[in-house]
Amino acid sequence: MLRHFPQINVSYAHSKRDYFIAVFTFFCVAVCLISDANASLEKQNALGVCAWVFLIGLLLGENREIRAQVGIAIIFATIGEHFASPFMGGYTYRFENVPAYVPPGHGMVYLTAVALGRSGLFLRHAREIAALVVLVCGAWSIWGISGYAEQGDSVGALLFCVFLGYLFKGRSPMVYLAAFFITTWLELIGTAVGTWKWAAIDPVLGLPQGNPPSGVAAWYCLVDAVAMGGAAPLLSRAKSVHGWIKFGKFRKNAYQGAENE
């Protein structure tokens, strides 16, 4: 069940860059969501511009594959945001929109999950961190369906089961583990300050859900899985297209050279 977890008793190297990305994103998430709690639409848009600048800056030190993954994550998550929020009403932002900082924010959140997942800390203590996450999220889910919670959370319990599937069956458990921390952080802050609110009854399942649902990390794991699975085919296709373009230019130049002779 843990075949995709890193090996035990291996000295994994620490990277200051990975920890910087994580600390920077955690800090930016808190500042952005708290600032947006009472912000105007203009300030919300300004936060979006800042988020794009920060994301581009962080991506300068990454390779093509990670950049492609981040791009896919942004596109997929943004489509999902518009479907789940304005269209379905699963959760609602203050202005009933998708704030300008959300697309680049998803890119930063995904990059943070990757950075933490490959960090020496997570690789060295993968099983201990996994046990902690399962215990904390499991207790949160049980609380949500116990009848003691102010708002029932059957959806959260279902999502927790999905999250366990990603964690123990997925091929990138370290990314999913890291995603739990950054996504739980942003969901708790965002809902606490009123930047967005989850519907008490899920519009699709018709079941009660928390604000936020306990297993909400599962939705972000879906974004991560799509990003990681789609990057290699995208780069391969781009390479093929680039090759055909170069071949076409070569044939054109060769043809023109033959005509000149």
Image (cartoon, helix red, strand yellow):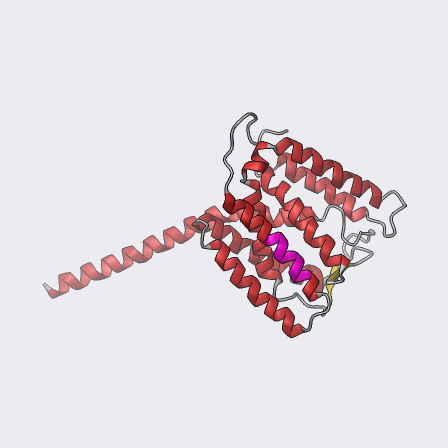
Residue at image coords 41%, 53%: 238
Residue in view at x 71 percent, y 54 percent: 187
Magenta extent: 25-33
Q: Closest to the observer: 91 or 143?
A: 143
Could one spot residue 171 in this view of the protein?
no
List x then y, in percent, for residue 136: 75, 39
173 in relation to 11, above or below: below
Residue 66, above or below 37: above
- Residue 250 in view of the camera: yes
Q: In this view, does 250 lie above or below 148?
A: below
Residue 19 coordinates in the image, percent (x, y) = 55, 45
* Depth check, front residue: 158 or 152: 152
* Near-viewer residue (258 or 132): 132
Using the image as rendered, state which of residue 100 and residue 13 is in the foreground: 13
In which quadrant will I find the C terminus?
A: bottom left
For residue 26: magenta?
yes
Q: Residue at x 43, y 50 (%)?
A: 64
